[in-house]
Amino acid sequence: MRHIKKYLVLLIIGGNLYYILEVLWRGYSHFTMFMLGGICFILVGLINEISITSNMPLIIQQFIAAIIITSLELVFGLVFNIWLGLNIWDYSSLRFNFMGQICLMFSILWFFLSLPAILLDDYLRYWIFGEEKPEYRYIGFNRKRV
């Protein structure tokens, strides 16, 4: 039950942040983006929690996060935009897009935006849920920075 509450809190925080970010970027959003953002936030936070190596370098976490977010954006786009016809977004006018649902420009943006998400998730887990205080490695596996 404790894990359910923790992930519900993280879903709500991540969903709200994603929704607000989209409103600031485009001027509007859609309720499905709350769910997408919440799921992305949870999965991005789990990268270092379930990684094979402890304290995976942040740059690798960011790369994995960008792949996760882009993949979920594609799934949500295929379901909500194409299959259900809601037309929430359309990237077809942007270069390097796939089916108008994802594009390279936003994948790169997700790489950079994932850093504050990773840090926020780690510190929320520490402050609210009493988990281990985060320590980070920025580039290599050998160097340790706090």
Image (spheres, rainbow, N blue to C red):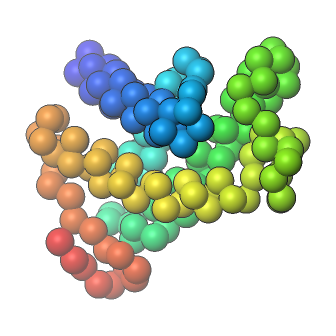
Question: In the visual, does 80 lie left or right of 123?
Answer: right
98, above or below 105, in the image: above
Q: Position of residue 66 (x, y in %)?
A: 58, 55
Question: In the visual, does 118 lie left or right of 44?
Answer: left
Q: Quadrant of residue 99?
A: top right
| Residue shown at the point (83%, 58%) measured from the top left | 95
Residue 79 seen in the figure:
no
Which quarter of the rendering shows the N terminus? top left
In-front residue for pair 1/7:
7
Q: Position of residue 105 (x, y in %)?
A: 69, 59
Q: Quadrant of residue 26?
A: top right
92, above or below 82, in the image: below
Which quarter of the rendering shows the C terminus? bottom left
Question: In the visual, does 30 lie left or right of 75?
Answer: left
143, above or below 30, in the image: below
| Residue shown at the point (22%, 65%) measured from the top left | 135
Residue positioned most to the front? 27
Q: Position of residue 110 (x, y in %)?
A: 55, 54
89, above or below 143, in the image: above
Question: In the visual, does 102 lie left or right of 96?
Answer: left
| Residue shown at the point (73%, 33%) measured from the top left | 89
Q: Position of residue 97 (x, y in %)?
A: 82, 52
| Residue shown at the point (15%, 55%) measured from the top left | 133
